[in-house]
Amino acid sequence: MIDVRHQDQLTRDEKKVYMALPFGKEKAIKVRNLSKVVGIPERRVYDILNHLSSHSYLVGSFRNQRGGVYRITNKDEYFYTLNMLRNNAKSYERRVRGLEQHRERFE
């Protein structure tokens, strides 16, 4: 796997989080636990994960009882994460459209 941004360009905290991510969804770790492992506040870990993903690092996540985050290692994990993000984006877009119906009241 090729990372778009070389790991040497990551901040110390980004590198700690990225290096602590397990490979594959079977070994996914909850963000709360990852936060404890790397010694970084949970909210900041979420921000770092988002930043890594938006800079083309292969960070996957899934939401179920076991849930967690991990490094994507195969096409199933890749497409699962991609489809989940697309579905989330569609859901947010529906919410935005619903709220926009009230825009006149607040302008």
Image (tube, rainbow, N blue to C red):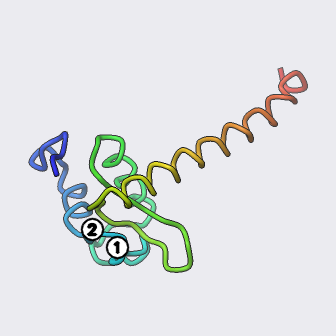
**Residue 98 horizontal side relative to residue 67, left or right:** right
Q: Secondary structure under badge 2?
A: loop
Q: Look at 29% across and 42% down and name the residue there.
A: 56
Q: Quadrant of residue 36?
A: bottom left
Extreme-left residue of the structure? 8
Q: Quadrant of residue 61?
A: bottom left
Tell me residue 65's x, y (percent).
Answer: 56, 79
> What is the number of the mark on residue 85?
none
**Residue 82 horizontal side relative to residue 14, left or right:** right
Q: Depth-wise, is mark 2 or mark 1 nearer the camera?
A: 2
- Name above or below for residue 18 compared with residue 39: above
**Residue 86 horizontal side relative to residue 22, left or right:** right
Q: Look at 24% across and 58% down and name the residue there.
A: 13
- The residues bearing labels 2 and 1 have C-alpha atoms spaced at a distance of 8 Å
Tell me residue 79's x, y (percent).
Answer: 42, 52
Location of the C terminus (image quadrant): top right
User: Which amino acid is tagged 1?
Assistant: Leu
Give whichever of 58, 39 is nearer the camera: 58
User: Which amino acid is tagged 2?
Assistant: Leu
Evaluate if marks 2 and 1 touch, with contact meaning CB atoms under 8 Å apart: yes
Q: Give the crowd class for mark 2: few <14, some 14-19, many >=20 residues within 10 Å.
A: many
Q: Secondary structure under badge 1?
A: helix
- Residue linked to disc 2: 21
Q: Look at 36% across and 71% down and name the residue there.
A: 25
Tell me residue 8's x, y (percent).
Answer: 9, 48
- Residue linked to disc 1: 34
